[in-house]
Amino acid sequence: MSGPGDHQVADSIEPADVQTLTMARALNAGLRRAMESDPTVLVMGEDVGALGGVFRVTDGLAKDFGDERVIDTPLAESGIVGAAIGLAMRGYRPVCEIQFDGFIYPAFDQLVSQLAKMHYRTAGAVRVPVVVRVPYGGGIGAVEHHSESPEAYFAHTAGLRVVTCATPQDAHWMIQQAIASDDPVMFFEPKRRYWDKGSVDLRAASAPLDRARVVRSGERLTIAAYGPMVRTALDAATVAEHEGISIEVVDLRSLSPLDVPTLVASVERTRRLVVVHEAQTFLGMGAEIAARITEACFYQLEAPVLRVGGFHTPYPASRVEEDYLPDVDRVLEAADRVLAY
Amino acid sequence: MSGPGDHQVADSIEPADVQTLTMARALNAGLRRAMESDPTVLVMGEDVGALGGVFRVTDGLAKDFGDERVIDTPLAESGIVGAAIGLAMRGYRPVCEIQFDGFIYPAFDQLVSQLAKMHYRTAGAVRVPVVVRVPYGGGIGAVEHHSESPEAYFAHTAGLRVVTCATPQDAHWMIQQAIASDDPVMFFEPKRRYWDKGSVDLRAASAPLDRARVVRSGERLTIAAYGPMVRTALDAATVAEHEGISIEVVDLRSLSPLDVPTLVASVERTRRLVVVHEAQTFLGMGAEIAARITEACFYQLEAPVLRVGGFHTPYPASRVEEDYLPDVDRVLEAADRVLAY
Amino acid sequence: MSDLASPRGPAGPRSVPPGGEAIDFVQLLTPDGARKRPAEYPLDVDADTLRGFYRDLVLLRRFDTEATALQRHGELGLWAPLLGQEAAQIGAGRALAPQDFAFPTFREHGLTWCRGVDPAQVLALFRGASLGGWDPAVHNLHLYSIVIGTQVLHAAGYAMGIQRDGHVGTGDPARDTAVLACFGDGATSQGDVNEAFVFASVFNLPVVFFCQNNQFAISEPNQRQSRIPLYRRASGFGFPGVRVDGNDVLAVYAVTRDALDRARRGEGPTFIEAYTYRMGAHTTSDDPSRYRPTGELEHWQQLDPIDRLVEYLLLTQTGDERYFAEIAAEADALGVRVREACRSIPNPLPESMFDHVHVEPHAQVDADRAWFRAYQSSFETAGGAA
Amino acid sequence: MSDLASPRGPAGPRSVPPGGEAIDFVQLLTPDGARKRPAEYPLDVDADTLRGFYRDLVLLRRFDTEATALQRHGELGLWAPLLGQEAAQIGAGRALAPQDFAFPTFREHGLTWCRGVDPAQVLALFRGASLGGWDPAVHNLHLYSIVIGTQVLHAAGYAMGIQRDGHVGTGDPARDTAVLACFGDGATSQGDVNEAFVFASVFNLPVVFFCQNNQFAISEPNQRQSRIPLYRRASGFGFPGVRVDGNDVLAVYAVTRDALDRARRGEGPTFIEAYTYRMGAHTTSDDPSRYRPTGELEHWQQLDPIDRLVEYLLLTQTGDERYFAEIAAEADALGVRVREACRSIPNPLPESMFDHVHVEPHAQVDADRAWFRAYQSSFETAGGAA
Ligand SMILES: Cc1ncc(C[n+]2csc(CCOP(=O)(O)OP(=O)(O)O)c2C)c(N)n1
Ligand SMILES: Cc1ncc(C[n+]2csc(CCOP(=O)(O)OP(=O)(O)O)c2C)c(N)n1
Ligand SMILES: [Mg+2]
Ligand SMILES: [Mg+2]
């Protein structure tokens, strides 16, 4: 069975091609393909038109698809999401851009009480295939509210799919899969990786939207990460390798649903797990993963699942964000601890 | 050292007295005492005045303290919390009522980006001693949005204290402690227990605001619960006792901060833990507790921490809520499972 | 250059509520049943239409009374009575063209009535057997919305979709489509509702904002939401606002029809304040004696939406006692039907709570369903063994 | 009874922006430096005050230019320039009484200037060294707010507090207090801002809503937020709205002072739209060439807020070239001081990130701090050992 959202994508395959793109460009190309192949796809948000979004992810779309399909909205996030729900009820597939993570909260009610629950409330009669794109995470030296990681709020909410990409390849395909999905999808984009380049295979996606992927194989322990922290985890694994420690890295990709089988398979081999994310550790994704994997692998685990995440403080001033954010050192410190059991 | 929020309460002790009150009346009496002892305490929200709130928790306050101190606000939750923040900046201690759990989301931005972060943003210069009262949880046969358990959203948010009461005694004192606290406090009231009676000692609180309490001692396993589920856990323990199984029950009381030492002390003895709550299990409080206690008690635990919570669905129609909500049977099923390890 | 808001609207027909303050609104039928003909809202209705209105009002009231009674008998968990607001809802509902789409509040039983939703489907939500009750696409009517004001943004978005479909201003009466967004006086304070005004105004959306000012948001009187008449809110957003006598079915019908026509022609949004009164409790859980000023209910009873239509039908000899008796009998039959339909609403199967969380498979929902199924069947096994 | 919003305000002084549409607003000083005296806003200012305004505008502009340069040199992470909006901010800021309390946006460097906040304190936020920068109680000025519109509700709440303190309408000029709530044209679309209007109106709060319409919300022109002039929003909520030439410091001063007086007297809220133009980028991260219509900047440069004051000072012989040179020198000195102050802003200590999460101890924060301290010192130990 195909995973959610990927069944409509296969049709629109371009001539075989692999390109090197930044994540921002890969997303842009993905949006463009989605808009080309389905006239009901709309892009809406603040400054997504002439400006092309503050990160230029929607660059050029207004020019090519017009302002009926690329909509500069009033400055009102609840309005954006609420209007997107109405558009979806009328048969459209709106892709909303929330300018920064910290500006999603005014839309919270529309997201958790309306978008997440509409299909359920209508006993399946109404579908709301809305995608909400959120540039998220820190590390870019920004002012307050521009570096947050709110994904756990949405993963805790039944009725929403929550995904996040870590590479240009995934960015390109996952955005198309998300748009093709008939469910609402919260699409978190690791903003500090927007300018990272990677090769994008324009012919095919790497995996269904709801699957995790082992992005590096290893023996002694597993690191589960997602979004901006995948690269950090991979860097840590590289450093550890020099010290003779073989680390497996899993890119979760989907936070709701969580791909538990992939994690379990990895942990059954490595017997140790560290979860890394930028979001507050307390009730962050690491909590759910620790609880769940401990239950699933109770007799296999040699050590408790350890978490490397944000401290229990608001995101601090950017001059200290490097101390706040999980980095290679902190990941390795946790690796040492988990190996010491 | 005294715990947060309890230092101002001791002053206003009434003549020695113990009364039998419903939780709603106990809260009402607590609010009244707070208002009597501190003229900066205000009550605000929808229908809190002449009506006394839809649950009558503010009954009679408008009559006795006037509409300058008991404020029927416009129908706007973001407005209520935002205005409360402004009032707090001017030196008041507003106690906001959110009419039902499901109506807190329009205020989400003001809660997580403003209320939670104001003290931090101002480097300690500004205090926002706002209490946000939220009747929460299901089991009352209500229509949609009237039965939710949104506490994990707030416990994940640094800068907020999150507490919930399970008895009239705690309700009476915790509301006073919350009001006396110089920090913002999310105060969750288990609405289906509003009419439960219990004895209230008007002379003294049972514990500081941030402490859990062992409400029943036992040997074989610990159940951690809070709010509406404390009674359910106690009932389960009673049933189990008949089957010869001795269960310890911990009422968490504070969800942020979590009283980890009390839990650890219990689990070190019983070696098994079940966490029970109504909220969605996925990323609910049980996840954090499981992750944390497993880390703290890795060598003591005989079994993984098991969770009994809401399924990963929106709160369903009330005719099936009894199947949705954790009950004595489901708690005992988890107890059996955890004991089977 | 300065816009000093005066608390009074322009002159027009008046009614004097208990406060003694004169209310300006569009009225076509006085409380005594006299017909008025304001130039801006010409209306010619034939006898059948008039009788149709009467029938609607009476049957709707009966449905509502019956539902209130069903709640008292424990058949419903809750009911939100519309007593007193029948004319507002029927006037608006009957003004809709078939292709129009409406977004109701939770008190919009007149709208469900006009849109052909079966009473049992409406009761299912209040019985706790459903979170919705009908398929919105079948009736061009969205479900009841409970979180105040949220549906008004959905209406704006839906209207954006209509625009993109090219279903505005074509001149084709079967194609041009408008949206009716219903909400209460209390809802006007919500951010969402005001954001919807911004969207509607900026994009010139084909939407009619239909606000039933029933004087209360639960216990809070209007003055807690606005210090000027609500219909004037629209002017601050750049579109027309109009206040109509909400207890006058002809006036509501004429004003709403006019606004919907404007919307369909591509002339943008209109705000309608239907000035009415909630004669019953907020819901069956409410106790209005705690907040209703003495004498107010009695005053409004003089302005009853059905009474004046009776007078007018008699006056114009469009209806007589025999006709009224006929409708009363039909209402009785409806009452019986509603009672029976309510009692026979099936309880949902427990396992159905896992249905429709998502369209596509979701591992966590599936796992929870599997667990639940096994858990349920463990009881059956246990039961079977006993 | 019907309120057909017309897109035009009442007649008044005019200016013609590039669109060619005449703008009605209060003006006391034309772009050529001619003095006008509208009857509603009498203003007599002495020479010192006039020169003070000039000094404010010039120094403020220099501060702003310097900060923009500091960002270019990597000393600031970001800067939000106010270029073009100096008169709006100085006019409003100087109208405040000492006891008044103001809630700024993130572009309100003129307000921080007027309220005596040290430039280094303002730069700390943009340097990433602080989330705030000053103690609001010391300056009666709240911190910059970044989430658009949120501070407007805080302002309403603060004004409720003033009411409860009995600091409105006493007639004592040292006691009566008003709140100034600043926001941009884009912010008027936010739910929070409209909810603040509801609160202010319903409770008749002593608050002045000061909206700087600088024509843009990042790239989006005004028309994406409203199809009528923004000052007219107030009429929908039942309080006065007024539009003022935002590039005319005298007019802004007069209008704001008048509104603050009203508020302090207990006559309730006023909405002021200061019609101005953001001549620079939205922030130093922005590229206005992507969206700014050609010729628009040049048009507005003709309307520069400083130029017209220079003309007026010359005309009235209140200032001469020597005086201007004096101020220019002072501006140069300020520039140096700002550069130095910026470079010497200390980096916060890493461990300070755990400070002030709560007033009272919080176990999780304490645990994280303890962990961090141990973790940090493990490096030091490692470093020391190496
Ligand atoms: C966001 C939100 N807050 C609070 C409530 C609780 N509530 C239900 S109805 C109501 C009053 C609504 O008043 P109004 O809009 O005038 O509609 P009416 O009930 O009078 O028809 C309130 C406060 C809610 N449903 N949603
Ligand atoms: C809630 C929210 N959404 C989006 C943003 C991103 N943002 C920062 S400034 C801005 C435009 C603000 O426009 P306006 O209110 O006119 O103020 P101006 O920048 O013109 O001074 C936007 C969209 C934000 N800060 N907050
Ligand atoms: Mg009402
Ligand atoms: Mg602007």
Image (tube, coloured by chain):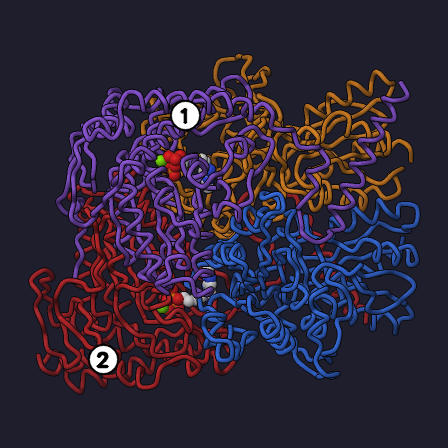
Chain colours: A blue, B orange, C purple, D red
Residue A331 falls in image quadrant = bottom right
State if disc 2 and disc 1 touch (CB < 8 Å). Answer: no
Total marks shown come to 2
Quarter holding the N terminus of chain A is: bottom right
Query: Tag 1: Cα neighbours inside 10 Å, few (<14), some, or many (≥20)?
Result: many
Query: Tag 2: Cα neighbours inside 10 Å, few (<14), some, or many (≥20)?
Result: many
Q: Position of residue B320 (x, y in %)?
A: 66, 31
**For this rendering, which residue is in front, C154 or D180?**
C154
**For this rendering, which residue is in front, A203 or B23?**
A203
Mark linked to residue D303: 2
Q: Amino acid at mark 1?
A: Gly
Ligand 4 falls in quadrant? bottom left
Q: Amino acid at mark 2?
A: Leu
Secondary element type, mark 1: loop
- Relative placement, left or right, of D247 versus B177 is left
Q: Position of residue C20 (x, y in %)?
A: 16, 30
State whether residue C87 is above or below residue D146. above
- Relative placement, left or right, of A106 versus A37 is left
Secondary element type, mark 2: loop
- Relative placement, left or right, of B156 versus D16 is right
Q: Position of residue B283 (x, y in %)?
A: 69, 46
Measure how far apart labels 1 and 2 are at the Cα level. 56 Å
Which residue has dot 1 on it?
B52
Q: Chain of mark 2?
A: D
Whether residue A132 can be seen here: yes
Q: Is mark 1 within 8 Å of ligand 1?
A: no
Q: Going 55% across and 36% down the picture, which residue do you hit?
A: B144
